[in-house]
Image (cartoon, grey):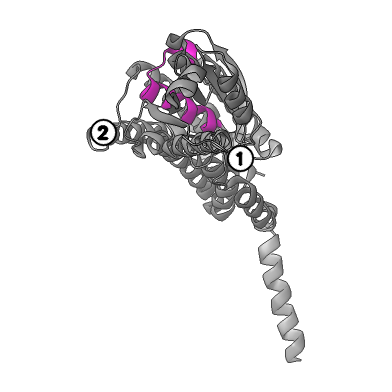
Amino acid sequence: MKLRQFLMFTQKEFYHIFRDRWTSIVLLLLPVLMIILFGFGITTEIKNTKFAIFDPSKDNATEELINKLGNSEYFSFEENLDNPDRIEQVFKEGRIGFVIVFGENFYQNLLHTKEAQVLLIADGTDPNTASTLVSYASGIIREYVMDLNQGQEVPYEIHTEVDLLYNPTLKGAYSTVPGVMGMILMLICAMMSSISIAREKELGTMEVILVSPMPPILIILAKVVPYFTLSLINFATVLCLSVFVLEVPIQGSLFLLILVSIIFIFVSLALGLLISSLVDSQIAALLFSVMGLMFPVIMLSGLMFPIENMPWILQGAAQIIPAKWYISATRNIMIKGVGMSSILNELMVLSAMAVFFIGLSLKKFKIRLE
């Protein structure tokens, strides 16, 4: 008898767990998503970074060093610069992650003075990546020098100098602030708005609201306007703290930064509305937001780990994460000081996402409850 009661209570608990299909999906898929993201996304290795060179010497020694760097797993040769003035330009374009500048008469200096100069230039907007790339390149150069010195009475020396563009002191805030801004806006707009609307549905008050004389579109706007306002306040607060407390500069246009942020807020609000239209409980909205929004923002947006180091399937998944495009744009505007033309791709993608998700969320929003 007791065994039967035990089995009945157990059956009841399983029923309560699985009666909400979205909660069930989240509970079963969350461990899978976590192991994939944490297993493949978290890595301190940086591979296949595209690098360019400025080589006024163009001799055998520089060619050997370039081949040695390009054949390593860490670097991939991309471009030979014909003018040192183009170095900062290629960094702003985002095509190059590392530049090597050889001194003039590189090989002749090695032969006659036993010394030569190499300048390593990295993008300091991501301090960890910049330090790692400099370390990799310095190690490869040291290996080359050791090979040259075999059997030499007077050893050769290649002196390396380091130039970290945009962030010479390697302040971590330069990298984290744009990412935290994206995470905060996503948290306020998407997660909190989805939970708020799901709470109305769970408590039954949404049905009362929907039968009111107010048109459904105005009901939707009334739900999202407070979160839009709060997001603008949070954006202004974070920006002021970043500039005046963390001393992160805004090198580019403040208007452009605000424009990109407003578009991202619209995307986040649309995602929150879409989630609330798919679930009927607060816990399901919370779990869905965590699994579908917060984890991808943290792991796949470039906030913590370089996207180019991830497996190709995760790199593809990162392209549909709105925060990835927002963080890239804000870093370029705030730290590199780029203009509209340099972030046009990010603007177009975010605008397309805003139109798509707003249209989809309005279509999925139920103006009548079943």
Q: Is residue 362 visible?
A: no
Give the residue type that dot 1 points to.
Ser
Q: Nearer the viewer, residue 282 or 259?
A: 259
Q: Which stretch did the figure color magenta?
A: 322-342
Horizontally, is 34 left or right of 243 in the view?
A: right
Q: Which residue is mark 1?
A: 277
Q: Are marks 2 and 1 in contact (CB under 8 Å)?
A: no
Among the two numbered marks 2 and 1 on one chain, the one whose residue lies closer to the N terminus: 2
Q: Which residue is mark 2?
A: 247
Query: Residue at horizontal 49%, vertical 22%?
Result: 111
Q: Could you say where residue 105 lies in the image, as x and y percent from the top left? A: 47, 14
Horizontally, is 178 left or right of 200 in the view?
A: left
Q: Residues within 10 Å of mark 2 (few under 14, many from 20)?
A: few
Label 2 – label 1 distance at C-alpha:
41 Å
Give the farthest residue toward the bottom: 1
Give the farthest residue toward the front: 153
**Quarter of the image where the N terminus is located:** bottom right
Q: Is residue 216 magenta?
A: no
Q: Quadrant of residue 185?
A: top left
Disc marking residue 291: none
Q: Could you say where residue 5 lies in the image, as x and y percent from the top left? A: 72, 85
Q: Residues within 10 Å of mark 1 (few under 14, many from 20)?
A: many
Give the secondary structure at mark 1. helix
Q: Could you say where residue 8 lies in the image, as x and y percent from the top left? A: 74, 79
Q: Nearer the viewer, residue 329 or 173?
A: 173
Q: Is residue 42 visible?
A: yes
| Front of the two marks 2 and 1 | 2
